[in-house]
Image: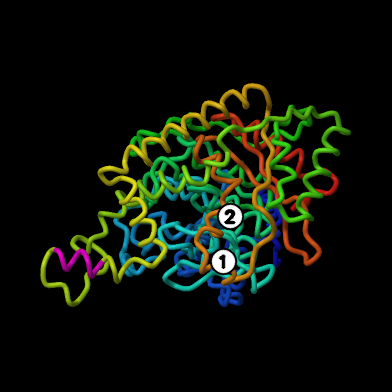
Amino acid sequence: MDLAFERISVYHDCLRLGQTTVKDEVLRCLESARSQAHLNAFLELYAEEALERAEALDQEISVGNFKPLTGVVVGVKDNICYAGHQVSASSKILDGFQSLYSATVVERLLEHGAVVIGRLNCDEFAMGSSNENSAFGPVLNPLNTSRVPGGSSGGSAAAVAMGACHLSLGTDTGGSVRQPAAYCGLVGFKPTYGRVSRHGLIAFASSFDQVGVFGQSVEDVARLVTCISGRDDFDSTCTADAHECLVPKGEKKLYRIGYSPSWMSSSVLNTELQSMLKNFLEQSVKEGHTLIPFEIEGMDYAIPVYYILATAEASSNLSRYSGLNYGVRHADADSLESTFKLSRSQGFGPEVQRRIMLGTYVLSEGYYDAYYVKAQRVRRILRDQFQRIMSECDVFALPTTVGPAFGIGSKSNDPLAMYLEDQFTVLANLTGLPAISIPLGSDEEGMPLALQFMGSSFQEQDLFQAASQFCIKEGIKNI
């Protein structure tokens, strides 16, 4: 039976009834990936080992052994380590490098029965909002190949949208899961900082990075997040309780919805998106939910603060890629200084070099107090402000993006315009709060538009519950 994947629960029912096998589903996903190779979502398919694992899982199913992710096909972003497999962060400086160990999230995927089908293209070192910065070429949006899929986790979004895997892992530093999810019509989730281990994740900005999940439904995303969450001895910042079930229970309730009136009607938003957001607020009131307006002080500083702090951390984290221990070493290097200069100039792309230079500048003597220290203070103000806001509401609603996916190349020569794509997503990373993007509808050209919810720290189940309830509202796409 050629199974068109709907969601994990339905898929598992089919496996139990013998209507399909894991091997059949892996073959379908591989065929989908190969037939749409022009989208450039996959850098590598693990076809042979995926089929071997599928056969082993089918054997387990035949004797009644079922795990939460049995047979679920998952793609992994190319900055998440997998033992014995290449990992490059889509950069020339790590081209051909093979990981010696697996990230905690990959180990937990395998422990819970998932099939890892391949590694997925991304912006180099997760730096970008369009997936045009990969050393291995841009990823195309499966819904319209003239548009970007979003970034930096564009390959992860495209792979799910094109049906080449059931779910995928991305990373979210300033919106790099939620924004691509919005552009590809998916559910995209970023957990509370500290819920999911960062061990085995190639770092961009350590105080912002979190492994996130793409899926076709809130329920599936919650199920996978449940499996990869929990404390990890290899990551001291990971403090969440293990085995806490985050899957929404299906019950409906009335919510206190926080929002910013100025953001929901901002002039930067696409007019169709403005209209949909207005309809969402009006419909919520009709259904009995309570709207609580907030005006956020310092929001104008969110993007500058994010890029000051994130690039500062990047300049430190990426200093290890020097051409000495691993990765690219320039053939003409004949001294320590020339090895550093030539290897890094050859190995890093323009956007990565730009961010390293900016980060080095804000950390330099004479500028550290003026930029970095002030940015940390503003981050604390925003965090404290949202702690208060979330004590007064159940979820905080805001746009995910300013509009639908933009055209490939349309913003490549304007870094500032590209950075502003993250203006509604960076808040969750600055504050460490969980956030989820859900489809809101489509514009006249059929491109997806999205709504975002932020939740209270470590209250992911409540956030998933709300997102699941609003996903089935009239006018909001239920995938």
Q: Position of residue 274 (x, y in %)?
A: 77, 49
89 up-or-down from 296: above or below: below
Instruction: Give the residue drawn at x 19%, y 76%.
Output: 331
Q: Is 408 positioned to the left or the right of 381 in the image?
A: right
Q: Is residue 340 magenta?
A: yes
Q: Which mark is residue 23?
A: none
The image shows residue 381 at horizontal and vertical percentages of 50, 29
Q: What percent of the width, then of the height, locates residue 249?
A: 71, 33
Between residue 471 and residue 33, name the one nearer to us: 471
The amino acid type, in three-letter code, at marker 2 is Glu
Label 1 and label 2: CA atoms lie apart by 10 Å
Q: In the rendered view, tell whether residue 417 sits above or below residue 39.
A: above
Badge 1 or badge 2: first in the primary sequence: 1
Secondary structure beneath label 2: helix
Examine the rendering and report whether any part of residue 444 can be seen: yes
- Residue assigned mark 2: 421
Write the residue at 24% across / 68% down: 343
Magenta residue check for 271: no
Does 221 sit above or below residue 118? above
Q: Percent x, y for residue 45? A: 48, 69
Give the image's coloring scheme: rainbow
**SS at circle 1:** loop
* Relative to 321, 237 lies left or right: right
Q: Which residue is mark 1?
A: 411
Instruction: Please state which of residues 459 and 54 is positioned toward the viewer in this rendering.
Output: 459
The crowd level at tag 1 (other Cα within 10 Å; few <14, some 14-19, many 20+) is some
Q: Are marks 1 and 2 in contact (CB under 8 Å)?
A: yes
Residue 10 visible within the image = no
- Of 410 and 75, nearer the camera is 410
Give, as a single range, the part of the protein colored magenta.
337-343
Crowd around label 2: few <14 · some 14–19 · many ≥20 (10 Å) = many
